[in-house]
Amino acid sequence: MGWASRVRDLFQQAKKVQPCIIFLDEIDAVGRQRGAGVGGGHDEREQTLNQLLVEMDGFDPKQTVIVIAASNRPDVLDPALLRPGRFDRQVVVDKPDIKGRRAILDIHIQEKKIDKDLDLDVIAKRTPGFTGADLANLLNEAALMAARQGKKIIQMTDVEAATDRVIAGPERKSKAMNEKEKEIVAYHEVGHALVAKFCQNTDPVHKISILPRGRALGYTLQLPQQDKYLMSRAEIEDQIKVLMGGRIAEDLKFQMITSGASNDIERATELARGYICNYGMSERLGARKYGKSQGYVFMAKDYSDHSKDYSEGTAREIDEEIRRLIDVCYAEAKQILIDNFDKLEEISKEILEKEVLDGKDFEALLSGVSSESESV
Ligand code: ZN
């Protein structure tokens, strides 16, 4: 039986057993805009979609069959699906906020054996941006880590290790960095952390690590105090400064720069472009949008020709403004690191020894109290 006839069959069965709800998960698999395929080969999918449209039109108002579908890509759906009488109401389900994450953790923790010290509030706080599936994955990772150590219950340390793993990929213990590389990474990461510390509009430093993870050689983790949905102009500027901090620290200490900052530079450039072109935050270029969003780039359709809606002269101005914004942020970040060079040295040496510093260690080192004397 082909897919189109299965759709027909599904609706027939639903009508027989009504009242009834039909739920179609990942509707974009069949519901993508028609005619967008490269060459042939999509006939089966188009027939399925056509059949679905026919069935949804064929509802008589007295019938009690409700059709619900879910998708992560509502932007690629065929417009015919969203017409009145078909899927005419859209409900946006966002990533869960801190309360939502707490409630989701409660569900996933039920069939697991956990230690008394496991603090779900703290875990919820440390996982902004996680979806329900990410949280389930996190707890499964934690359970695996506990099991690998022969433990029968999941402890807070397991969840912490699992969080790092989920956020940054597994530790690459096998790929040892040489001492010089390690030193460069240490100064680079502490550079990020110090600039973050001395900017007013950034999130607190939660952890600094020089253990390579995934593709990153080290990382500095800043965590927001609460979930955020908006970024102010000052926050974007500060974030660009923090991103520049790594490269500046390398330059100040070793009078050389490495390729390690390429991702930072890419992200800073994206932020600067957003600042100017999307959010209208540049005084020189004003509160207008430059360039069209590319929400419809998929399959064979190419919308890139339409994305530039400004002149060559304006393009040059945008480039100059991006350059200027990054230069200003670079200079301010550099001043912070020059003023705090002794702290840069001290904390980098500490992290070379310990490989990981948490937020508390970092604060203690900054205020001049060594973490050893504190723990005594
Ligand atoms: Zn960096």
Image (spheres, helix red, strand yellow):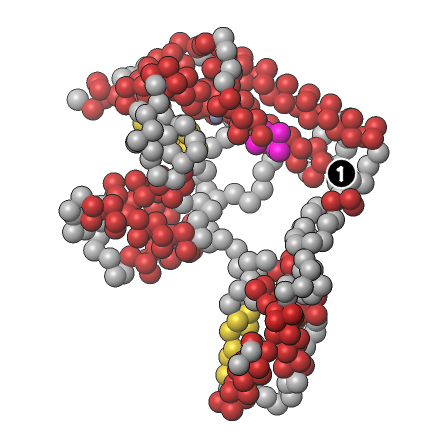
Residue 245 shows in the view: no
Between 35 and 219, the one lying in front of the other is: 35
Instruction: Determine which quarter of the picture holds residue 65.
Output: bottom right
Judged by its main secondary structure, the magenta piece is helix
Question: Residue type at mark 1?
Answer: Tyr
Residue at x 41% of width, y 21% of height: 185
- On the image, the x and y values in percent for residue 130 come to 44, 49
Judging by the rendered image, the residue that carries numbered circle 1 is 290
Between 347 and 371, the one lying in front of the other is: 347
Give the position of the C terminus as an image quadrant. top left
Is ligand 1 within 8 Å of the beta carbon of the residue shown at mark 1?
Answer: no
Decide if residue 306 is on the left or right side of residue 119: right
Instruction: Determine which quarter of the picture holds residue 234.
Output: top right
Residue 19 located within the stretch drawn in magenta: no
Residue 270 located within the stretch drawn in magenta: yes
The mark tally for this picture is 1
Residue at x 45% of width, y 9% of height: 254
Residue 15 shows in the view: yes
- On the image, the x and y values in percent for residue 152 come to 16, 51
Residue at x 59% of width, y 88% of height: 63
Instruction: Determine which quarter of the picture holds residue 158.
Output: top left
Q: Is residue 344 above or below residue 271?
A: above
- Residues drawn in magenta: 267-271
Between 193 and 81, the one lying in front of the other is: 81
Residue at x 56% of width, y 76% of height: 3
- On the image, the x and y values in percent for residue 373 come to 21, 18
- SS for tag 1? loop
- On the image, the x and y values in percent for residue 311 come to 84, 34
Residue lying at the far front of the rendered structure: 40
